[in-house]
Amino acid sequence: MADEALVIATTTGPVRTLTFNRPAALNSFTAAMHRELRTALDAAADDGAVRCLVITGAGRAFCAGQDLNDPEMSGDVGAVVERIYKPLALRIRSMPVPVIAMVNGVAAGAGANFAFGCDLVMAARSASFIQAFSKIALIPDCGGTWLLPRLVGRARALGLAITGDKLPAEEAERIGLIWRSVDDAALADQTQALAQRLAAMPVKAIAATRRVLDEAVMISYADALSLEARVQAELGQGGDFREGVAAFLEKRSAKFSDR
């Protein structure tokens, strides 16, 4: 139906799940879907009860990249990247909670790089990742040029980007491109278990860990040590640090609440 949500949000305790909902089009991105996704991401970021975010796709695909039939995303490709994909990639990297991509099927083009931009990728064994850009005479976008060489090195990044070959989930795990591949039937349960586990952890520190790891690859070792000191000073003033130390000394489970 035309008025059906393109991104469905559901919540289980402290875990919010966003599901791309264009299964007939393999959940390919349209401008309308981008708008709903950005609204849903902002809502999750603003909701203090959300402590972990899972993103997945309906049907047999995670996301097949950009819908080339969408008139709103035709024309100047560079303008589309600057206006839509850049803000989306930056929004994911600035989320105040951990973000898991649950890749249930093919993730291609911008859909693959969107998943790689999340903190952890859990994939079904039948899933695959495709850098489809060379097939239409483009370069990887949605952060792909930055992410791929940092995740798997220059040689593999170039190979994936140039050939556009399909990469099975198990091979993606083996080369360090994703966190884990699991049996298809276990994907939802194992991802939810991981999400609930992360939600019980100090999520503010997890978000800070993401930030400093990303920043550290672009600075010197000495500057990275200084960055560590600054962020540790900030986190050391937080309630989660005090709670973590108290729980350790009292030999009990910590109850973290900072965000």
Image: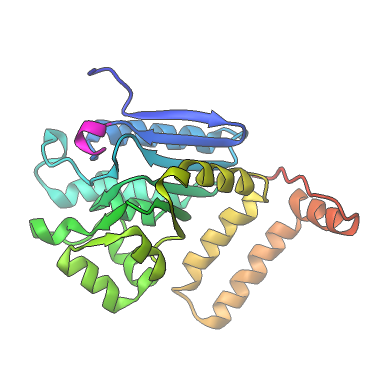
Q: Is residue 24 magenta?
A: yes
Q: In the shown orientation, is residue 130 left or right of residue 41? A: left
Count the marks: 0
61 w.r.t. 43: above or below? below
188 w.r.t. 203: above or below? above
Task: Compare residues 104 and 118 and report the one nearer the observer.
Answer: 104
Image coords of residue 107 (percent x, y) = 28, 50
> Quarter holding the C terminus?
top right
Q: In the shown orientation, is residue 85 left or right of residue 74? A: right
Image coords of residue 170 (percent x, y) = 37, 62
Image coords of residue 138 (percent x, y) = 13, 59
Task: Compare residues 18 and 145 and report the one nearer the observer.
Answer: 18
251 w.r.t. 56: above or below? below
Q: In the shown orientation, is residue 242 left or right of residue 21? A: right
Task: Compare residues 33 and 56 and report the one nearer the observer.
Answer: 56
Task: Single out the residue that lies furthest toward the right.
Answer: 250
Residue at left offset 46%, top offset 60%: 179
Q: In the shown orientation, is residue 235 left or right of residue 19? A: right
Q: Quadrant of residue 185?
A: top left
166 w.r.t. 162: above or below? above
Residue at left offset 24%, top offset 17%: 1
Image coords of residue 116 (percent x, y) = 38, 57
Residue at left offset 62%, top offset 74%: 226
- For the rendered model, the colour scheme is rainbow
Q: Which region shows up in magenta?
A: 22-27
Q: Is residue 114 magenta?
A: no
Residue at left offset 60%, top offset 55%: 206
